[in-house]
Image (cartoon, grey):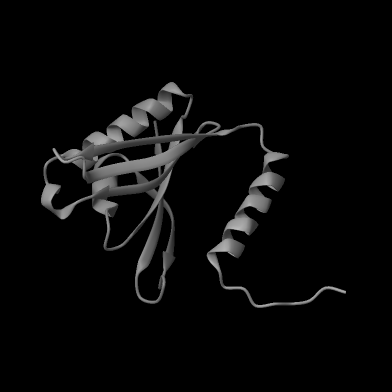
Amino acid sequence: MYQLKADNTDALNSALRTKIVEFNAQHFDAQRVPLGYKFVDEQGELIAGISGCVFGNWLMISWLWCSGVARGQGLADKLLTALEQSAAELGATTAQLDTLDFQAKPFYEKRGYVVKYQLNNYPRSGTRYFMEKTL
């Protein structure tokens, strides 16, 4: 018989992700191709970066971060442009991302992203926006 056990560990989360990715791979006709770019300072410290992957004809943007000392210098725009261009070269036709109301929604809107769906009261009083852009 099976036993129900509580398990709040990262290990369980990772194992479940692995199992689902393995299952899904049987049904997808595309591989995930990781992409990323970064800016570093003279000491090699991370100043700004972006990461995501191309999955079929989709660019899935995971993370875009810029250090407070480097904001307003156009680094995020350069990172996003580089990622989009690389993704398009790999066959991506649409980019997808999510952002929170206190993060970068106006930044993405200026670059052609539109809100396709939003979660209100996320996680309690904020808003999470799911955005897309045709590349």
Q: x and y percent of residue 104 in the render?
A: 27, 53
Residue at the front extreme?
Answer: 43
Residue at the extreme right of the image, as rendered: 1
Residue 81 placement: quadrant: top left
Horizontal side of 47 relative to 52 (left or right) equals left
Seen from the viewer's position, the closer of residues 77 and 113 is: 77
**Residue 97 pos. (x, y %):** 41, 47
Q: Residue at x 83, y 73 (%)?
A: 2
Total numbered labels placed on residues in the image: 0
Instruction: Find residue 77 and report its horizontal and vertical position in percent.
Output: 22, 38
Tell me the quadrant of the picture where the N terminus can be found.
bottom right
Residue placed furthest toward the top:
89
| Near-viewer residue (126 or 42) | 42
Asked whether residue 59 is in view, the answer is no
For the C terminus, give its image quadrant.
Answer: top left
Q: Residue at the location (68% across, 52% down)?
A: 19
Q: Is residue 120 above or below residue 59?
A: below
Left or right: 26 in relation to 40? right
What residue is rendered at 37% in x and 36% in y? 36
Front residue of 131/77: it is 77
Left/right of residue 14 with respect to residue 73 in the rendered view = right
Image position of 112 (left or right of 133): left
Q: Is residue 101 visible?
A: yes
Residue 45 placement (x, y as % from top left): 21, 45
Q: Which of these two is toward me, 119 or 42? A: 42
